[in-house]
Image (cartoon, rainbow, N blue to C red):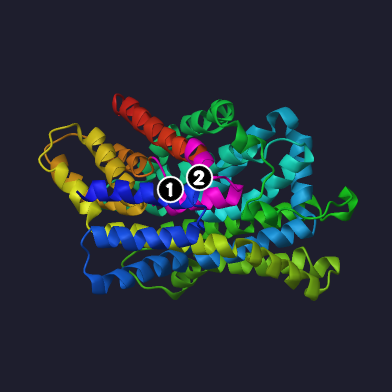
Amino acid sequence: MPLLIVALGIVVLLILIMKFNLNTFISLVVVSFLIALALGMPIDQIVKTIETGMGGTLGGIALVFGLGAILGKLIADAGGAQRIAMTLIDKFGEKRIQWAVVAAGFILGIALFFEVGLVLLIPIVYQISKQINISFLWLGMPMATALSVTHAFLPPHPGPTVIAQEYGANVGMVLVYGFIIAIPTVIIAGPLFAKVARKYAPSAFEKTPTGSMASIGDAKQFKLEDTPSFAISAFTALFPVILMAISTIVSLLRDPETDNVFFDFVAMVGAPTTVMLISVLLAVYTMGVARKIPMKDLMKSAENSIAAIGMMLLILGAGGSLKQVLIDGGVGDYVAQIFEGSTISPLILAWLIAALIRLAQGSATVAALTTAGLVLPMMVGTDVNVELMVLATGAGSIIASHVNDTGFWIVKESFGLTMKETFATWTVLETLISICGLVFVLGLSLFV
């Protein structure tokens, strides 16, 4: 019954948005209430659950997105995004620019959270697409693929790091095996899949970008000599990566059993919110003050960027509400019970359980952690490689991103896609990443 209720709830959501053109934010809140009632949640807990889901989601990403949008807008309005775009086009050529964007997404994705990577790269990718007059999504989708793959498979991202702790796996080996799996997965699900998707979902690739994140990169065109230098522009855009990378390296040197103010300070500076705040302050100087741009104009850019993402933040929060309803309503627990006592291969079982929990309640992190708790007892007495178990669980936990996943709404709003286009591109793409991950894990298990 819980899975049927979820399925019916998703159908109602799609009807409200696609048939009746009801605002996505309102539709998500309405469906969250309906599913909560249908799951039999205590009536006095429903509003609290919806508010908790909204607050929990926005608490984690509102500051990051807000500051990231300001950073992107400051770089775009000063001509920094245009300078980076033109330099990349000049160095790689138009024919290879998609691979340059994928490489940039992969490198940044190792250090950055998925959301941070998007808000930094989308304005630059938008500028590139405008300069050489090619589809925004043609470049944007492979870039998002690279960010998603690194988020799913490579520590120090939260998912693989936490799962490694649960399984008692060696984080360093997870990183090594993760690279082996991530690189071919990015190639298949990124540039190669984009060619296929453009054939069966042409409208998504042909449209003029209207997404809130794309509008951040939509700045006036400059003469190249009037833009900041490539070194300054790239340093400002990459500064969050540099800070996070330093913080990660320092944290690896820390003895977890000792208290140290220095390490605590570095951890605070390396948190995404702090990183983005410091990066914005740097951009105010490099993109504004140093170029004699009045502070009033800089703050106007900041205000415009926040106005551009206001509705997107509400939609993301409402998506978090729906996810919280499904978690508190016990949907994940119900899926977990189905597999109790199973004798399937631990690697396939971990992927399968994580995939079903992900489909049912949306959160990749919850799916991964729930799976770890269920699969651990089944691993006893087997010689399965625990590092590969981490990657199999991570692969299952990102399958088929749809309406109960915050990432679905981030991509839809960022690229200005319709519901149908988002399903045809992003949902299929995430499923492809998940399946590739499982296939490569099984292949690797033959050798390690």
Please state which of the two labelled residues, at mark 1 or mark 2, is closer to the viewer.
1
For the residue pair 26 and 437, the one nearer the viewer reads as 26
Q: Which residue type does callout 1 highlight?
A: Leu
Residue 384 place in picture, x, y as percent: 21, 35
Q: Is residue 328 visible?
A: no
Count the numbered circles shown. 2
Label 1 environment density (alpha carbons within 10 Å; few <14, some 14–19, many ≥20):
many
For the residue pair 21 and 74, the one nearer the viewer reads as 21
Callout 2 secondary element: helix
Q: Is residue 319 visible?
A: yes
Quadrant assignment, res 45: bottom left
Classified by dominant secondary structure, the portion drawn in magenta counts as helix
Label 2 environment density (alpha carbons within 10 Å; few <14, some 14–19, many ≥20):
some
Quadrant occupied by the C terminus: top left
How far apart are the alpha carbons under marks 1 and 2? Answer: 8 Å
Disc number for residue 14? 1
Residue 91 place in picture, x, y as percent: 76, 35
At 70% across and 66% down in the image, what residue appears?
304
At 44% across and 62% down in the image, what residue appears?
318
Residue 343 place in picture, x, y as percent: 12, 33
* Residues drawn in magenta: 400-424
Q: Which residue type does callout 2 highlight?
A: Met
Left or right of 407? Residue 70 is right
| Residue where numbered disc 2 is placed | 419
For the residue pair 237 and 363, the one nearer the viewer reads as 363
> Mark 1 near mark 2, Cβ–Cβ under 8 Å?
yes
Q: Is residue 419 magenta?
A: yes
Residue 6 place in picture, x, y as percent: 29, 50
Dot 1 or dot 2: first in sequence order is 1
Q: Is residue 69 magenta?
A: no
At 20% across and 62% down in the image, what residue appears?
40
